C-alpha cells in the first residue's frame, strides 16, 4: 500500500461500542424474564431466553472480529492486554445473563412469596448498574478524543466509583435474599432451593462484571 | 542535431518526467493527513498543493537542488570528460524513474529522494571509484534520513502534548481552542512566510536580512491571527456539559487550522523534493553550457520553475486520482491529530531543505504520526508499515545505484 494511510488502522474501539450494545440488549431482557417468571408465563420465559441467547451469540461474533483486528502490528493508546481484558469482561457480562436465562428454563419454578420483594429489588439494582456500565463504554469514543484526560476522564472515574459502590450494595441485597431463601420452609423442594440460590449468585455475578468494566476503564486512564 | 542539444533535450524530458512522478505519487502522501481527516476535500487538497508545492519548489528548492547536483560528488573526477557527468546525471534520472514505476507496481512506499541519491552515488562510484564521493556530505545525508523521522516523531509528540494539556484535557476545550488556535495559525504563518522571504526571494533579487524578513513574516502571521479570531468567534458556544459536542466543535476549529498546515506540508515537500528532478538537470545544464565542471554557478531560476511546474502538472493530471482514493477511505484521524503530525513533519522537512539536506517527506510524516500515537493521540496505528518502509529503504539505494551504473556504462560505450 503506497499510501501513508495504511498506517491508520481501523480503530478497535468503535466495534467495542457495537459489542456492548449487544450486551445491553441482553441486560434489558432480565427484567422481562423475571416478570414472566412471577406471572408463571413459562412460554414467555422460553421466548425471552431464546432472544437472550441470540444476542449473546451476536456479541460473540463481534468479539471474535475485534480479536482478529488486534494483530501483532497494531499499536493502541492502551495496553493490548488491558484492552483484551475489557472485551472479555464485557462478554462475560453477556454470558452471565445467558446463564441466568438457562437457569430459569431448567424447571418451571414458582417464585416463593416471602422472597419476591427482595428479589425484585436485587434485579432492579443489578440491571440499573449493568446498564450504567454499558453507558460508560459508550463514553470511550469521547475519552479517546480527550486523550484520556480532562472532564471525560473524570466522568469515567466517577462512574467507575459508582459501579464499585453499587456492587457492594448488591452484595448486601444478595445476602438478604439468601437469608430469606434459606429461611423458607416446606413446601419448597431442595431442588428449587438449589436453583434459586444459583439465580441469586448469577445476579450477583452480573453486578461483579459491571464493576470490573469500571475498573478496567480506570486502568485505561491511569496508564 | 548535435549531441549537446540532444542530451539537453533528453535531460529536460527526464527531469519533467521525474517531476510529474513526484507530483503524481508523493504529494498524495503529503496531503494524506488533511484529506483523511476531512479537513480538505481531495479537490481542495489538489488546489492547495498545486500552489504550495510550486512556491516551495521555486522559493526554497534551490538549497537541496544544489546538494543533489554538486554536493555529493567530487567535481574533479569529470574534468577530463565533462560529458560523462551529463551521462551520469541522465542515467540517475532514468534509473530513479524506472525504480519508482517498479515500486509503484509492487505497492511499495518508496522515497524519490533515496532513489535519486542512490543513483547518483552509483554512477559516481563507477566513474571515479570510492574517492569520487564526498563522504562527509553523504554521511550527513544518510544521518538525516534516520534523524528526520525521529525528529518528526519528537516534535509531533510534544505538539500533541501541548494541545492536549492546553485544549483537549481542559474543563472547557472549546473555549480554550478558540483562545489558542489563533496563536498556532500565527506560528505556522510565521515559519512559512519567513521561509519564503528570507533568502527565498533571492531568486527574484529581493534580498532581505533575517530581521527584515522576520518582521514581514510576523505581519503575515498577525493577519492570520486576526482572520482566525474573526472567523472563530462566530462559532456557537456549546455548554461545557455536552462534552462530546464540545469536542466536535473543537475539531471543527482544528479543521480550519489544518488548511494552513496542509499548505505548509505541501510547501515543505516541494522545497525538498523538487531537487530530485531538478538537481541532475541543473548539473547537466551547467556542464553543457560551460563545457567544464563549474561548481560556483548558482541554480538557474528557470530550472526550478520547470521542476515546480512539472510537479504541479503531475499532481493535477494523475495525482488527483490517488487523492480521490485517499479521500474515499474512512480514517480515524481527527483534525487535531492531523495538525500535529503535519506541523511536525513540515517543520522538520523545511529545516532540512534550508540546510540543503535531501530527505524523505513521506518517512518524516510517518515518524510524526507515530509521535502522535506515542502521545496516546490515535485510536490505533498500524506500525507494520515501519517494516515495509525499512525494507524499501534498504532496497531502493542499492537498486537505483546499480541501475544507474549500468545505464551510465551504456552511455559511455555508445556515446563519445
Image: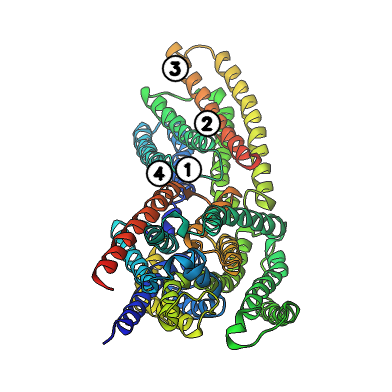
Residue A185 appears at what percent x and percent y? Answer: 53, 12
Q: Are marks 4 and 3 on the same chain?
A: yes
Q: Are marks 1 and 2 on the same chain?
A: yes
Q: In front: mark 4 or mark 3?
A: 4
Instruction: Give the residue number, with chain letter if any, for mark 4.
Output: A69
Chain holding disc 4:
A
Q: Earlier in the sequence, mark 2 or mark 4?
A: 4
Q: Earlier in the sequence, mark 3 or mark 1?
A: 1
Work out how far the residue at label 4 is from the one at label 3, CA to CA, in angstroms.
Answer: 45 Å
Q: Earlier in the sequence, mark 3 or mark 2?
A: 3
Q: Are marks 2 and 4 in contact (CB under 8 Å)?
A: no
> Outermost residue toward the left?
B414
Q: Are marks 2 and 4 on the same chain?
A: yes
- For label 3, the crowd category at 10 Å Cα-Cα, with few meaning under 14, some 14 to 19 and many 20 or more, is some
- SS at mark 1? helix
Q: Which label sits on residue A192?
A: 3
Amino acid at each position: 500500500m503506497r499510501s501513508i494511510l495504511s498506517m491508520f488502522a481501523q480503530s478497535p474501539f468503535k466495534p467495542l461500542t457495537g459489542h456492548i450494545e449487544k450486551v445491553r440488549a441482553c441486560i434489558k431482557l432480565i427484567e422481562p424474564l423475571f416478570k414472566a417468571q412471577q406471572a408463571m408465563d413459562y412460554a414467555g420465559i422460553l421466548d425471552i431466553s431464546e432472544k437472550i441467547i441470540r444476542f449473546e451469540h451476536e456479541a460473540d461474533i463481534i468479539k471474535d472480529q475485534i480479536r482478529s483486528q488486534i494483530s501483532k502490528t497494531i499499536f493502541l493508546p492502551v495496553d493490548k492486554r488491558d484492552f483484551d481484558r475489557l472485551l472479555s469482561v464485557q462478554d462475560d457480562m453477556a454470558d452471565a445473563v445467558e446463564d441466568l436465562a438457562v437457569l430459569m428454563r431448567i424447571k418451571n419454578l414458582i417464585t416463593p412469596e416471602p422472597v419476591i420483594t427482595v428479589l425484585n429489588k436485587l434485579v432492579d439494582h443489578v440491571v440499573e448498574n449493568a446498564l450504567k456500565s454499558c453507558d460508560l463504554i459508550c463514553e470511550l469514543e469521547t475519552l479517546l478524543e480527550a486523550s484520556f484526560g480532562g472532564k471525560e476522564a473524570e466522568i469515567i472515574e466517577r462512574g467507575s466509583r459508582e459501579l464499585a459502590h453499587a456492587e457492594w450494595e448488591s452484595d448486601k441485597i444478595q445476602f438478604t435474599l439468601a437469608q430469606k431463601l434459606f429461611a423458607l420452609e416446606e413446601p419448597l423442594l431442595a431442588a428449587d432451593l438449589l436453583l434459586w440460590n444459583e439465580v441469586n449468585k448469577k445476579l450477583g455475578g452480573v453486578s461483579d462484571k459491571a464493576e470490573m468494566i469500571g475498573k478496567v476503564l480506570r486502568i485505561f486512564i491511569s496508564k | 542535431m548535435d549531441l549537446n542539444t540532444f542530451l539537453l533535450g533528453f535531460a529536460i524530458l527526464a527531469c519533467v518526467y521525474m517531476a510529474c512522478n513526484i507530483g503524481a505519487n508523493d504529494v498524495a502522501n503529503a496531503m494524506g493527513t488533511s484529506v483523511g481527516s476531512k479537513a480538505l476535500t481531495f479537490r481542495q487538497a489538489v488546489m492547495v498543493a498545486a500552489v504550495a508545492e510550486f512556491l516551495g519548489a521555486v522559493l526554497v528548492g534551490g538549497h537541496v537542488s544544489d546538494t543533489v547536483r554538486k554536493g555529493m560528488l567530487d567535481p574533479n573526477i569529470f574534468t577530463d570528460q565533462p560529458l560523462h557527468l551529463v551521462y551520469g546525471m541522465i542515467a540517475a534520472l532514468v534509473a530513479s524513474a524506472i525504480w519508482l514505476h517498479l515500486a509503484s507496481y509492487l505497492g511499495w512506499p518508496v522515497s524519490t529522494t533515496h532513489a535519486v541519491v542512490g543513483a547518483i552515488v552509483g554512477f559516481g562510484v563507477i566513474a571515479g571509484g570510492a574517492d569520487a564521493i564526498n563522504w562527509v556530505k553523504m554521511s550527513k545525508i544518510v544521518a538525516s534520513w534516520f534523524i528526520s523521522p525521529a525528529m518528526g516523531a519528537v516534535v509531533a509528540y510534544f505538539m500533541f502534548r501541548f494541545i492536549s494539556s492546553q485544549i483537549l484535557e481542559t474543563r472547557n476545550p472549546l473555549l480554550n481552542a478558540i483562545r489558542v488556535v489563533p496563536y498556532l495559525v500565527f506560528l505556522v504563518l510565521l515559519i512559512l512566510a519567513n521561509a519564503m522571504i528570507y533568502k527565498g526571494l533571492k531568486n527574484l533579487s529581493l534580498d532581505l536580512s533575517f530581521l527584515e524578513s522576520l518582521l514581514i513574516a510576523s505581519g503575515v502571521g498577525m493577519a492570520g491571527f486576526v482572520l482566525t479570531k474573526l472567523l472563530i468567534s462566530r462559532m456557537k458556544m456549546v455548554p461545557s456539559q455536552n462534552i462530546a459536542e464540545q469536542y466536535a466543535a473543537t475539531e471543527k476549529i482544528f479543521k480550519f487550522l489544518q488548511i494552513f498546515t496542509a499548505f505548509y506540508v505541501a510547501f515543505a515537500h516541494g522545497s525538498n523534493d523538487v531537487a530530485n528532478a531538478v538537481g541532475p538537470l541543473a548539473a547537466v545544464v551547467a556542464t553543457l553550457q560551460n563545457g567544464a565542471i563549474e561548481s560556483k554557478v548558482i541554480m538557474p531560476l528557470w530550472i526550478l520553475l520547470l521542476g515546480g511546474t512539472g510537479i504541479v502538472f503531475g499532481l493535477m493530471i494523475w495525482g488527483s486520482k490517488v487523492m480521490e482514493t485517499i479521500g474515499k477511505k474512512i480514517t480515524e484521524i481527527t483534525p487535531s491529530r492531523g495538525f500535529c503530525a503535519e506541523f511536525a513533519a513540515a517543520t522538520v522537512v523545511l529545516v532540512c531543505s534550508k540546510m540543503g539536506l535531501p530527505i524523505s517527506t513521506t518517512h518524516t510524516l510517518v515518524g510524526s504520526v507515530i509521535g502522535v500515537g506515542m502521545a496516546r493521540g490515535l485510536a490505533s496505528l498500524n506500525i507494520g508499515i515501519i517494516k515495509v518502509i525499512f525494507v524499501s529503504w534498504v532496497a531502493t539505494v542499492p537498486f537505483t545505484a546499480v541501475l544507474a551504473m549500468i545505464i551510465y556504462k551504456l552511455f559511455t560505450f555508445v556515446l563519445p
